[in-house]
Image (spheres, grey):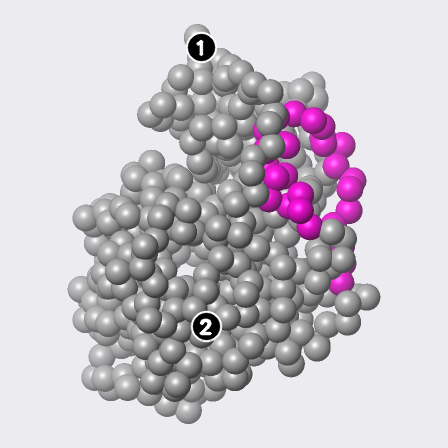
Amino acid sequence: MNKRNVLLISVDHWFADLMGCAGHPVVMTPTLDQLAADGIRFTRCFSTCPVCIPARRSLMTGMFPSSHGDRVYSDRKPMPDVTTLAQAFRNAGYQAYAVGKLHVYPQRSRIGFDDVVLMEEGRYEFGCVDDYQVWLGEQGYAGQEFLHGMGNNSYLTRPWHLGEQMHPTNWATYQMMKQIKRKDPTRPAFYYISYQFPHPPLVPLPCFLDCYDPDEINMPEALDDWQDDSTILRLLKEQAAPYSEKEIRRARRAFYALCTQIDFQIRALIGTLRETGLLRETVIAFLSDHGDTLFDHGICGKRTFYQHSANVPLILSGEPVKEWRGEVRDQLACLEDVMPTLLALCDIEIPDSVEGIDLLHHQRKLLYGEIGEGRKATRMATDGRYKLIYYPCGNVFQLFDLLQDPEERHNLFGKPELADYQNQLMDYLTSSLHGEDLNWLREGYLIGFHAGEYASSPDYSLFNQRGLHWPPPSGYTSLGKT
């Protein structure tokens, strides 16, 4: 048997450019920069459905949303009945352990892992008290994890309010180090650590917040030539509308601090692998489920196909990938490719249900993405250089040249000189539509649907707050979900 181990590190809301090695002007990620230098970094990796649950279903099954059944955010949909990433490793004789955020239903479903040390951000509405909450109670802080007062989809911020060791990032790291030390020496291991940050709430440890001077924080610039008063863009900007320039600067500073905090915690994981004699035989992979526009284009959060929402980091590092050391690849990739790539690296058979490809030995020419239904539905087609974004609400098209315009400031849709690229992406996007999306077509052409007049929605962000979690809260309504 191939004796390679795997440590898969997943984060949440972290876009591909948010690393020093990717050229970010502010954020400090020395650990990830070194891992990239010692491995291979994919610059064109996309989340094909950039929101938590569908993206994680793609990661754990190697299947696209059209096959695994979620392109919205179906928080009560069980994992499809296929061989998952963890189960494929276990079928090959591996021990498989997870720590952190799985975001599956039921919450205690192990989706193929031998065991899961769970942290689910206080989602009591599913009838589960997770392991992090139990641990907090054992330390005498039962139910106090959300008394910082920050919301789970809010961009207001303050420093973490409890001790350093109680921060979810540090707790998850410590739990994974314990799992590594408990390894069965007769079997290889697949480890999956899933950090909940930099997903809001934006509550970094003060020491990492202090790493960033407020004056050095880069701010979003209003340089897009495609901004208008269309209904779809006004809908997409609603979440960002309440924040002032001061609050945006503070949010970005806290966001960067959460990233640096994770980066430093990864060093402790690597140190544990080294001191247990596992490092030289371990593949280390780093990725995010999706990104965060973080007020670029006047938008915050995920659920769009702009680069900071859909383009995610993907690094493979460690001695088992030394033949690709230092490579930076711009080939087209997606989360569905992670499962077959890791399995192939460990000489494990790839299940027939997997739709992704082994990125180290194969390439794809085109990629389709889909997020949402109804007025905010968005579809995407890309060849890695050109990206077509389609909003059926108002039948709006955008075409970007990611090589010449990586920040997506210039909409090139309709430019005669790009007709061949545009038509190729349009044909691919149209042929990939399924289900109710086919109603957007007439005689083979996209017509979308009438956008209607824009009317601002009530701001229900306060309805997303969490409070004292001891005793466990009851009486959740639909407004209490995230």
Q: Is residue 220 magenta?
A: yes
Q: Residue at x 56, y 35 (%)?
A: 457
Q: Is residue 144 visible?
A: yes
Label 1's element? strand
Residues packed near mark 2 inside 10 Å, few (<14), some (14 to 19) or many (20 plus): many
Mark 1 and mark 2: Cα distance apart in space: 52 Å
Looking at this rendering, what residue extends furthest in the top direction?
Answer: 443
Crowd class of label 1 (few under 14; some 14 to 19; many from 20; radius 10 Å): few
Horizontal arrangement in the rendering, residue 383 relative to residue 53 (left or right): right
Q: Is residue 206 above or below residue 11?
A: below
**Mark 1 or 2, nearer chain start:** 2
Q: Quadrant of the N terminus?
A: bottom left
Query: Callout 1, which amino acid?
Result: Arg
Q: Nearer the viewer, residue 302 or 468?
A: 468
Secondary element type, mark 2: loop
Label of residue 115 in the image: none
> In front: 297, or 325?
297
Residue 413 occupies quadrant: top right
The answer to whether residue 389 is left or right of residue 193 is right
Instruction: Left or right? Give the position of 226 relative to 425.
Output: right
**Residue tagged 1:** 442
- Quickly name the residue at label 2: 145
- The magenta stretch spans which residues? 217-243
Residue at the location (44% across, 15% down)? 441
Examine the residues drawn in magenta and state their main secondary structure.
Answer: loop
Q: Amino acid at mark 2?
A: Glu
